[in-house]
Image (cartoon, rainbow, N blue to C red):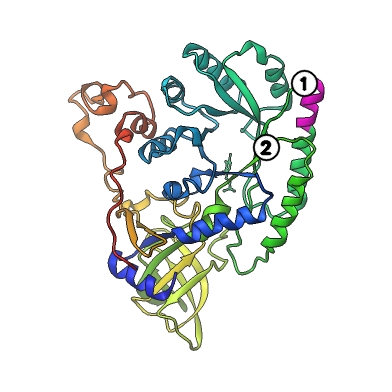
Amino acid sequence: MTEHQIENLTAQYGSPLYVFDVQALHQRVALLRRSLPTGVGLCYAIKANPFLLRELCGQVERFEVCSPGEAAICRRLHIPAEAQVISGVYKTPADIERMIAHKNGPRLFTVESARQFTLLSQLSARYRVTIHVLLRLTSGSQFGLEEEEIIRIIRNRADHPFILIRGLQYFSGTQKASLKRLQRELDMLDNFACSLMEKLGFIVHELEFGPGFPVQYFSSESFDEAAFLSGFSAMLTGLRCKAHVTLELGRSIAASCGTYLTRVVDVKRNKGQNYAILDGGIHHLVYYGQRMAMQIPPYRLYPPRLGEAAPWNLCGSLCTVNDILVKQLPVPDLKCGDLFAFSSTGAYCMTEGISLFLSRALPRIVLLMPDGRSLLVRDALPTDEINSPAYERTDYHGTTACNSGGTSARRGLHHLPYADRFALSGFADYPCTGRRAGGGV
Ligand SMILES: Cc1ncc(COP(=O)(O)O)c(C=O)c1O
């Protein structure tokens, strides 16, 4: 984004503000495609940034959906069911049933446990719907299945006539910059896939692999991405099993398109230290790997300036000494009204903060479109309501009036956690009302 665009966007929408640059997003996907072997699919992990979902339609083959809330976002945005893989360590049974029962619902699911496999088998048989599954191999955490369990499921596959086991899924973590580690993981998966063929005559048609490609956030890190991607591509080309590979990616697709804008609203000097108070903070912005604000994330300061720098602690607006975005940042002549633009904030930065602490509002979100228009896709979102007790829902006997009204109560969802209830209640089903018109930038 240019200085002029940033000026216009903050004039129009104020701060704090997230801006996601759609052209930069598309360019990033194009770069990944150019760097990877032809035919490798891309699956976008929605959790990285749901606001990019529609902009990635047609850019990636698939979306990874991990919760009823993410499924609701997909419905709201009319993401085609055939472009979704329903994943997640807890697949809410009611939600999965609704998907399978729906004539045009998603048909590709991952399996993370024997219990999930049984659930999917029973539901697919009950509704006489064929579904496809990817069996997630564990990397030694709560996620996925042991090899022995996968072998058992595949050996007994004939007992589940409505389930087509398409292949394997594997994800072991994010920010993985070691090609050696990725090689070990791919070798292990390759050997396992080949052994399934040798032992059980089972062909792994598809390997959905989350490589956890890294993003360089801090000036202290060095990373040659071109060499990394070329090394990784060579590994994919060398696989013995001829499975179709789909890469499940979030961070590497989304990070570069995001900018978080926050303004200095107060400056002070306490006990020999310079403090700048920002109108944002750690409830809006979290960089993976930022250790006690000691690292310097990518940023620009507006208006730009030269001069002798002094060290500043950039603090947010929360009542905690932990609300520091950067410690001891050398800046010349910092003043109230100055604007910080933190970049590479398109993935996770926005959702991993302590959003509800202090009941401050969440920032506006704007998409900067390739034609220069800006679209306000989320207004500033107050959180005080979420943090307010709703006494009107409680009757005189002190019991919650779950059965006496409210959409979710009417639909008998009151036993569910609120977030899931909301997603399932049908609030999420309303059609997309389109984008708000925005001004040119
Ligand atoms: C199963 C799975 N796949 C893919 C991803 C995306 O990882 P990344 O953002 O590192 O690409 C995640 C992130 O947590 C995940 O849990």
**Along the line of sight, which residue is nearer the eye, 323 or 200?**
200
Residue 116 is situated, as x and y percent measured from the top left of the image, at 56, 22
Q: Element at badge 1?
A: loop
The type of residue carrying mark 1 is: Gly
Name the residue carrying label 1: 201
Residue 323 is situated, as x and y percent measured from the top left of the image, at 44, 61
- Contact check, label 1 and label 2, Cβ < 8 Å: no
Q: Residue at x 41, y 38 (%)?
A: 74
Q: Residue at x 33, y 71 (%)?
A: 8
Instruction: Assign the N terminus to one quadrant of the image.
Output: bottom left
Is residue 327 left or right of 17 when viewed as pictured?
right
Q: Residue at x 48, y 11 (%)?
A: 126
Instruction: Assign the C terminus to one quadrant of the image.
Output: bottom left
Mark-to-mark CA distance, 1 and 2: 17 Å
Magenta-drawn segment = 192-200
Location of ligand 1 given as a quarter of the image: top right
Q: Is residue 321 above or below residue 97?
A: below
Q: Is residue 411 above or below residue 82?
A: above
Q: Is residue 271 visible?
A: no
Q: Which mark is residue 244?
A: 2
